[in-house]
Image (cartoon, rainbow, N blue to C red):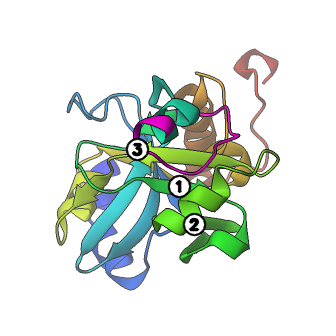
């Protein structure tokens, strides 16, 4: 049954971008860069895909990093996240439209320009995640990984994107599994605790 459904995936993804979705590493994904990761897809098109890993905080705080790079004053206490194995400029995912370069999903934005980052780290109340590195896929590569069962997909929410605990992968994996069951079996209600069924 899985193989029949999976055969439809290339057709579906050719029709719709997965920008603003979460990629949840399945147990079948053995690449050490992505084991038990949750990736926010920032871009997804026929040219490829780009995202950031949400649940790989480093020990370094944004404040420390800003001192090292000679940046503007910094008020955020957040930790820098390892966004993926591909090096590149610092990027921030946030909710302040004034510092936005693109909208990833409604109310959630991306910034990579230095003046936007300097402005964001002065904010203390707005949700913010700063990333060093990112995840990238060439044309068709991500679609093939999804078809092979490497990733589960779930719509992103601000709650998941800015989650601070170390249990994000477990939480979204359960939610994705529940959504898949509802869709495949047309279940109207699935209890949190299966023993209650």
* Image mark count: 3
Residue under label 1, please give it. Answer: 92
Whether 48 is among the magenta residues is: no
Work out whether mark 2 precedes mark 3 in sequence or the reverse, and give the earlier one.
Answer: 3
Would residue 119 appear left or right of 43 to someone viewing this image?
A: right
* Farthest residue, direction top: 195
Residue 82 position, x and y percent, is 39, 37
Q: Which residue lies at the image location 56% right of the left edge and 44% below the top edge?
A: 176
Disc 1 and disc 2 in contact, CB within 8 angstroms:
yes
Disc sitting over residue 116 in the figure:
2
Mark toward the viewer: 1 or 3 = 3
Residue with the most extreme bottom position? 15
Using the image, determine if residue 122 lies above or below residue 16.
above
The residue carrying pointer 1 sits among few (fewer than 14), some (14 to 19) or many (20 or more) residues within 10 Å by Cα, namely many
At x 40%, y 53%, the residue is 90
Is residue 111 at least partly visible in the picture?
no
Q: Secondary structure at mark 1?
A: strand
At a point 60% along the width and 33% down the height, the residue shown is 174
- Tag shown at residue 180: none
| Disc 2 element | helix
Give the quarter of the image for residue 108. bottom right
Mark 3 neighbour class, 10 Å CA radius: few under 14, some 14 to 19, many 20 or more: few
Range drawn in magenta: 67-79
- Residue closest to the eye, 159 or 115: 115
Q: Position of residue 115 (x, y in %)?
A: 54, 67
Q: Which mark is residue 69?
A: 3
Cα separation, mark 2 vs mark 3, equals 15 Å
Q: Quadrant of residue 11?
A: bottom left
Q: Residue at x 82, y 47 (%)?
A: 125
């Amino acid at each position: 049954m899985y193989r029949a459904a999976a055969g439809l995936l290339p057709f579906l993804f050719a029709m719709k971008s997965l920008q603003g979705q979460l990629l949840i590493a399945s147990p079948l994904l053995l690449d050490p860069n992505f084991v038990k990761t949750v990736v926010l897809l920032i871009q997804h098109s026929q040219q490829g895909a780009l995202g950031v890993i949400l649940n790989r905080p480093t020990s370094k705080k944004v404040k420390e990093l800003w001192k090292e790079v000679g940046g503007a004053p910094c008020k955020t206490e957040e930790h820098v996240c390892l966004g993926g194995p591909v090096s590149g400029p610092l990027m921030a995912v946030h909710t302040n439209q004034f510092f936005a370069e693109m909208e990833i999903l409604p109310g959630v934005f991306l910034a990579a320009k230095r003046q936007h980052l300097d402005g964001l780290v002065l904010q203390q109340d707005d949700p913010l995640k700063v990333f060093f590195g990112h995840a990238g896929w060439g044309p068709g590569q991500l679609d093939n990984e999804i078809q092979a069962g490497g990733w589960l997909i779930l719509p992103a929410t601000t709650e998941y994107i800015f989650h601070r605990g170390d249990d994000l992968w477990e939480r979204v994996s359960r939610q994705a599994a529940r959504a898949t069951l509802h869709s495949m079996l047309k279940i109207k209600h699935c209890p949190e605790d299966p023993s209650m069924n």
